[in-house]
Amino acid sequence: MAPKRKRSQARQQQDASTEASLGSQGSRRSSRRVAAAATAAAAAAAEPAHNTANPSHSVVDHASKQGTEGRKRNDQGSASDVTATAPAKQKQKQKRARKSGSASQASCPPTLIRHNGPPGCPFVFLLAHGAGGKSESSNMQRWVALLQHVGAVCQFDYPSNRIDSYTGLHAAAVTACHVEYPTHTLVLCGVSMGCRGSVAAINELGGAERTVAGAIFFGYPLIPLPHPAVGTEQASKRYGPLMELSPSARILFISGTKDPFVAKNPQGVLGGLLKKKVKARAKLVVIDGADHGLKQSGKPKHDEAILQHVQDFCQMLAG
């Protein structure tokens, strides 16, 4: 019986040790589970705490990113807008510069280029150039030489071909010419565009019969090219100022039958207007075969006849 008891006690001790071992393992596992659960709970608790502690941080960052991207897009859009509007703004600046330049030119008397006439001559001609050349051009020097047979000649230059913007400049040239030749009889002369400038100056001065004795127009450009319909604004700019001339104004028109600016029909187009619409005392001389520059086949074949008409007109002014 003793050996059986010993084996039974031994088994009991072994079972107790096994249970203790298993119990310690279970407790370790439980402690691990508890620790893991505690860690998970702490992590879970820490994560919402982080989000709720700074809820606006991520929103602010997102908004700032959106704002930055928006600003970038706006900056890019602004840059493209500036690029797109730069030509328009440049044109506006140029337009304002032209207007301010016109105003400054009109407020300052132009520089006169003087050419002496015959000794004791009573006339001075203020000669305005056309759109095709300035005062020093060979075409204008042709007219200077012709007019010098009758009187002294003064010239000046328009800053551009925008004649409607420089009527004040032409009127200032009239005043300057009177200062240079106070005792002479002033006659305005124009070549093409210069004819329009002369008409505008007479109308602007007002009471021109006391300031300007008369005017001579070599190739008045009555109809712009291509020919617009009668009554349009473009056409009225050419003949409208003629209709505003004072009844006391005395004008000599010289045009050629080959001049497209009077539809190659100066007698019918320009003559008809002068007869029906213009109140000024106007005379039209038609040069057969002459073009807009009063040349024939590119040569000034009619200058002697033109000079005779100029002399006759000046004698009429003097009488």
Image (cartoon, grey):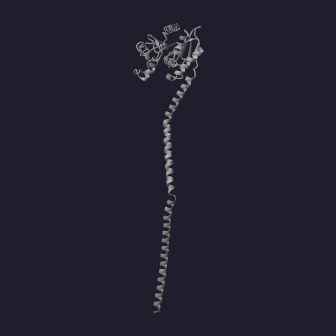
Q: Residue furthest bottom?
A: 1
Q: Nearer the viewer, residue 125 or 12?
A: 125
Image quadrant containing the N terminus: bottom left
Q: Nearer the viewer, residue 299 or 111?
A: 111
| Image position of 143 with respect to 21: above or below | above
Instruction: Please report the residue visible at 52 percent of the width from the left and 31 percent of the height from the top.
Output: 93
Picture coordinates of residue 157, whole percent (x, y): 55, 20
Picture coordinates of residue 263, whole percent (x, y): 41, 16
Q: Is residue 295 among what the camera can see?
A: no
Instruction: Please report the residue visible at 49 percent of the width from the left and 71 percent of the height from the top.
Output: 34
Picture coordinates of residue 119, whole percent (x, y): 59, 8
Q: Nearer the viewer, residue 168 or 45?
A: 168
Q: Is residue 63 among what the camera can see?
A: yes
Picture coordinates of residue 317, whole percent (x, y): 52, 9
| Image position of 47 with respect to 29: above or below | above
Residue 125: image quadrant is: top right
Residue 103: image quadrant is: top right
Instruction: Please report the residue visible at 48 percent of the width from the left and 89 percent of the height from the top.
Output: 6
So how many labels did they put on this image? 0
